[in-house]
Image (spheres, coloured by chain):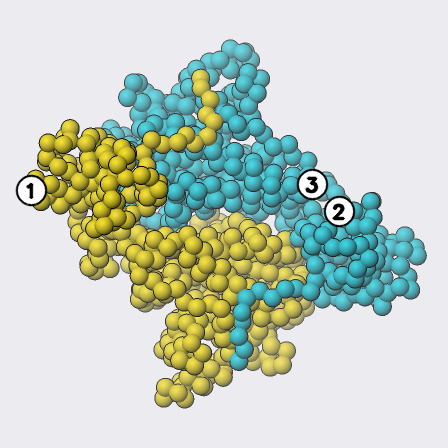
Chain colours: A cyan, B yellow
Amino acid sequence: MKFLTGVSKQDTMEISELLKAKAGRQVKVSGAIHTIRDMGTVAFVILRKREGLLQCVYVKGNTDFRLKDLQEEAAVEVEGILMENEKAPNKIEIQMKTLTVLSMPEDGMLPLPVSKWKLNTSLEAKLNYRPISLRNIRERARFRIQEGLTRAFRDFLYSQGFTEIHTPKIGAKGAEGGANIFKLQYFHRPAVLAQSPQFYKQMMVGVFDRVFETGPVFRAEKHNTKRHLNEYTSLDLEMGYIDSFEDIMAMETGYLKYAMELLEAEYKRELQILDITLPKTERIPAVRFSEIKEKAAKKYGHKMRNPFDLEPEEEQLIGRYAKEEWGSDFVFVTHYPSKKRPFYAMDDPEDARYTLSFDLLFDGMEITTGGQRIHDYQMLMDKIAARGMETDGMEQYLSAFRHGMPPHGGLGIGLERLTMKLVGEENVRETTLFPRDLSRLDP
Amino acid sequence: MKFLTGVSKQDTMEISELLKAKAGRQVKVSGAIHTIRDMGTVAFVILRKREGLLQCVYVKGNTDFRLKDLQEEAAVEVEGILMENEKAPNKIEIQMKTLTVLSMPEDGMLPLPVSKWKLNTSLEAKLNYRPISLRNIRERARFRIQEGLTRAFRDFLYSQGFTEIHTPKIGAKGAEGGANIFKLQYFHRPAVLAQSPQFYKQMMVGVFDRVFETGPVFRAEKHNTKRHLNEYTSLDLEMGYIDSFEDIMAMETGYLKYAMELLEAEYKRELQILDITLPKTERIPAVRFSEIKEKAAKKYGHKMRNPFDLEPEEEQLIGRYAKEEWGSDFVFVTHYPSKKRPFYAMDDPEDARYTLSFDLLFDGMEITTGGQRIHDYQMLMDKIAARGMETDGMEQYLSAFRHGMPPHGGLGIGLERLTMKLVGEENVRETTLFPRDLSRLDP
């Protein structure tokens, strides 16, 4: 019998600790051998650690092991002397004295050259060998940025009085309607996977006023594009007692500002690795759907096909317009047509063909859909009836409205898309750890 | 066209702001009318706000509205004078002058008496009317505690160098094996819902060294007990470069200490509402499975039926033993029998009938399973072969090991169970927003 009392200090050091330590002192580190560069009498053994790469110098005769006993991708523990070196990563290196192999790979020859600075291989190959390709420093850095974006979302919303919720992903009925629903058998009953936490977060506005969730959503869309995933992470919020749907856009602007500050403060290393210049978020233009659609079409000579929808190409042009006219990478497009929004969207009282809703475009791509929701029970029932919808399975959702709901609205941000645009990638699979698409279910 | 620049200050005040304001000043608040107590010439209109209840006083003739125009569960905005009152919630009240109805319910008569302090109704009724029952102050407070536990998990692990990951919930193969897997059709291919992020978090140890995820997991177990859910939130971590599996227990102890500190600091209001005394987490005993099983059986005269398994009743006795002998609500039970652990568990080199693994019991119930994993490729392949398992669909998981993995281990915490024990409930559905069980798929 013994007692556990909490995390005990490790005797191995992380890069951030080494950077604070004095050169000349003996240190111990652990890591995976990222690459070995043998120069004859001297060799560089580069360790991959969670905070980056660490150069260890092997000089024949100075160590208790032989270079040829090492292998790339071995997990090792190294003892040696910490030294400064302008040319090494982080300008430090370790002159190796002793080495212990913690784990030797069966096969140190990787299917991809992950130790190269840029992994110039096809997306297909990277995804096929996902646990290997992510060992590349730049590949993995994207997901540290993604962590920062998620963390910022939560921290910012905690500070704004939001409560975090966990809502079920298996349910009896989809929130968004339509055909893109994954179906499953739930103990001999038909069930579906959640397309969004929409119904749940709205119901919880009646409880906590402000709620958010960061979790997976599932869309059985048969799109095979660079921007669609069949499972993605949605950053969802819903807030009550709003004065107008602008409050929701203001909240998202606040989040984006906070996120950029957090990335700047806590993820500088990864921003440098990926050579990212953060977009400006001090002020984000908001412009009406019909207005910006026309303006962009006119400026760039684009022919509008459908006045009630935005094609991806039009989104790009609107993004370009916002950049050129207002110097902004982001633009809120407001007042989307009612027929393109779900039943719970609040119509604009001044023109019911449009809704009090918005998309946020980042560099010409939709990364958020949001808006004010209907809070009045009768208005909701009328809209459902007008759309010819069935209310089976929506009894508790509707009862929340029957028994009083404050004016409210919310939004959902596609985390992988936001990350993609921030790190400057063109395919959303590049910023998804393990993408799910029409053809990819594994790994 | 306009610009959004971030969250604008609301003109309505939250309870924490009112508590800092001077009595006598005019204030504006919004909220839902939780209950109305009409005493004749005076009436108390209690608002439900996200930070608690707020008493508003109606005196006939002093206001621009009539009491009979109000209804419970209406969302309103109130202006009036802030006053001190020893008997009111938070010892403040507002003498109402004007009131604006933001939203009037279709039906203010709720199916449950949510404005009572304790909602003494059946669990069945509470779950059937979930969006309503959670409007009760004590019911909702549990989920604020749950937020604190999740938030603490993430914040603590960020501080310990962990990276947050999002892994897919739809996959080709289950990580834990067995029959309790939900199956679905994925574009005409068979697929399953993730029983745990096990394979993914292990693969990501080879990338980030330390990772965690907080997300849903799905178990098609046909258990209808107070402690089983078919979908729950798992707090998962996995860490590389461990010296022993005790490092994992130490990390969990560190988390629990941090969580109790965070609850004490940020969730005092909810701790008071629920009258919770936080458990001690300074030192948690760890004792071998076979040893504690025998000790508890002996002390309480329990007859052991199976030396290689723990029955729920035995867990309770072990919990009682830990409380009586070591004054601890928690106890790590270590070295579980190999045959009760999955193939990836590391066997104890000193006795292969047992594993380098543990469960954490909280008040006599398992809330965590964890342990060291096999990191050596050949050892893993041998174990898979010995169990007669198929490796189809595990190619990428196995390739991570073939190409080198550090010694590592991890754990999964059932968030709803941890919350249940902390708030002193007996059924895990009490601490699940929208439980999924054999009979419940809705709401």
Q: Amino acid at mark 1?
A: Gly
Q: Secondary structure at mark 2?
A: helix
Q: From what the image shows, is residue A333 above or below residue B144?
A: above
Q: Are marks 3 and 1 in contact (CB under 8 Å)?
A: no
> Whole-percent x and y of residue B312?
37, 75
Residue B339 in sight from this viewpoint:
no
Q: From what the image shows, is residue B248 above or below residue B71?
A: below
Does label 2 or label 3 sit earlier along the sequence? 2
Q: Amino acid at mark 2?
A: Asn
Q: On the same chain: label 2 and label 3?
A: yes
Say few, some or many: other residues with alpha carbon within 10 Å of mark 2 (under 14 / 14 to 19 / 20 or more).
Answer: some
Which residue position is annotated with label 1?
B40
Badge 1 sits on which subunit?
Answer: B
Foreground mark, 2 or 3, reads 2
At 20% from the left edge and 30% from the top edge, which residue is drawn? B98
At 30% from the left edge and 52% from the top edge, which residue is drawn? B140
Say few, some or many: other residues with alpha carbon within 10 Å of mark 1 (under 14 / 14 to 19 / 20 or more).
Answer: few
Which residue position is annotated with label 3?
A273
Q: Secondary structure at mark 1?
A: loop
Say few, some or many: other residues with alpha carbon within 10 Å of mark 3 (under 14 / 14 to 19 / 20 or more).
Answer: some
> Whole-percent x and y of residue B428?
34, 62
Which residue position is annotated with label 2?
A90
Q: On the same chain: label 3 and label 1?
A: no
> Whole-percent x and y of residue A135?
68, 50
